[in-house]
Amino acid sequence: MFEMSSVGKPREHCGVIGVYSPDKSIQVSRYAFDGLLALQHRGQESAGIYVQNGKGITGHKDIGLASTVFTKKILSTLYGSKAIAHVRYSTTADSNIENAQPKKFVSTLGSYAIAFNGTITNFLKLRAILEDKGHVFHTDSDTETIAHVLAANLLETDDYSQAIVESMHELKGSYSMVLLNEAGELYAVRDPLGFKPLCIGKINDIYMIASETAAIESLNGKVIQYVEPGEVTRITDDGPVRETTVKADRRARCMFEFIYFSRTDSKFDGISIYKVRERLGKILSEIHPVDADIVVPVPDSGRTAAMGFAEESGIPLKEGLIKNRYVWRTFIMPVKAERENHVKLKLNPVRELISGKDVVLIDDSIVRATTMKRIVCLVRNAGARKVHVRVSCPPIIAPCYMGIDFPTSRELIASAKTIKEIEKFIGADSLGYMTIDGLMQGIGLPENELCLACLNKNYPIESIDTDYLEKQLGGARRSEN
């Protein structure tokens, strides 16, 4: 599901949860809710939980954080032994309740609900084809297009797994998805290239599907398997059953999951996010060494890389920037001046640590560079002698059409300026980016296992019409500033 936060970072987009209890007397909505809390970093626009209770599918969703959308009273009404849940940032549709997930639909086999993380790159074309066939759409989201494609395939078969597989052959793009039907069948689905993470765990006798391992482990559960790229897995009373797999000749795991999106305590297909970020910091120190007094992470996503940089370089790590965690939803503010003022309120330098020092600022990425420019200014105003910037992601030169809210090409600073020009723009004494080779080394995967399209313009989806997507999807994004 495209959009940018007002602090200059890509939005994490969406997180999905699926919960299945073999014991039909157990109410699983609380497990779904706790799972959403663990995935709240992946989306703070809306939250929803739908349950199957033997009589059908019902649920609740609204705009806001999971903790405000769901009260104890609301959770107590969501009775059922199977559930799916979702936290959302929009990437292809407006932020409103109509586009919130999960989404419930009615087919020839009854009702079903889906929750989805990703972007369907051909959803506008699929939608036009379906509308010509008489399908009526009520939202502008790609999620509804998925549901209509599935409904069309359910007309040809009474088997959900088969209908899902047929739909996967039509859908292009990235998707990790959970589906719950009124018969109580719960499915986990991941696109053939494996852009987004999806895993399955067990909490006592209850099975949970989640976007990240941290959601399962934070509930004292154990991860039992990763949903493989192209895989359709059904959860049964006896556990997960891999029903079928749609093959692809490569993988395209989103490199930004390793750098920024995923929680540091998560694993993506068994690869530790913490270890990757720490290695990237060490590699960054080797590629761009610097003589400085302190290493300062840009909180919070730059912290682990900063630890690696400090360890490798021998320069002490200091928490020189403090983040105000209660001023963070600035992207909803309509006036640019208000947003910029609130960005200043979000980070405050510790002058006693910074004054008179040569500082190395470590961040995970630079998109437009307006945020880094403000941070460099903050650090200079706190008395730093020199400010060196090091970035654990290579320069971002192209938009993402697989579910990240990078802005259009003309807004990406690295697509139009050299590193020296960016260095001058942000006001740094030096600027050093990670290399693509260093990135692959840090992650531990080769190029044909990763999506690096925003770094090298080599999109892993065949026949992707970037001009079309830039026009149609880029135009729908709300401006950052």
Image (cartoon, rainbow, N blue to C red):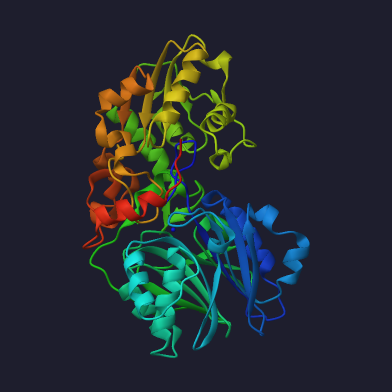
Residue 287 lies in what quarter of the image?
Answer: top left
**Residue 156 placement (x, y as % from top left):** 38, 90
Q: Can residue 219 be seen in this view?
A: no
Above or below, 155 against 287 in this view is below
Q: Which residue is drawn at 54% across and 30% down?
A: 343
**Residue 421 placement (x, y as % from top left):** 27, 24
Q: How many labels does the image show?
A: 0
**Residue 145 placement (x, y as % from top left):** 42, 70
Q: Which residue is drawn at 31% across and 49% down?
A: 444
Above or below, 76 against 365 in this view is below
Above or below, 456 against 371 in this view is below
Q: Which residue is drawn at 46% across and 32% down?
A: 307
Residue 411 lies in what quarter of the image?
Answer: top left
Task: Report the front residue among 162 and 145.
Answer: 145
- Tell whether 195 sits left or right of 417: right
**Residue 425 placement (x, y as % from top left):** 34, 22
Residue 122 lies in what quarter of the image?
Answer: bottom left
Q: Residue at x 64, y 55 (%)?
A: 66
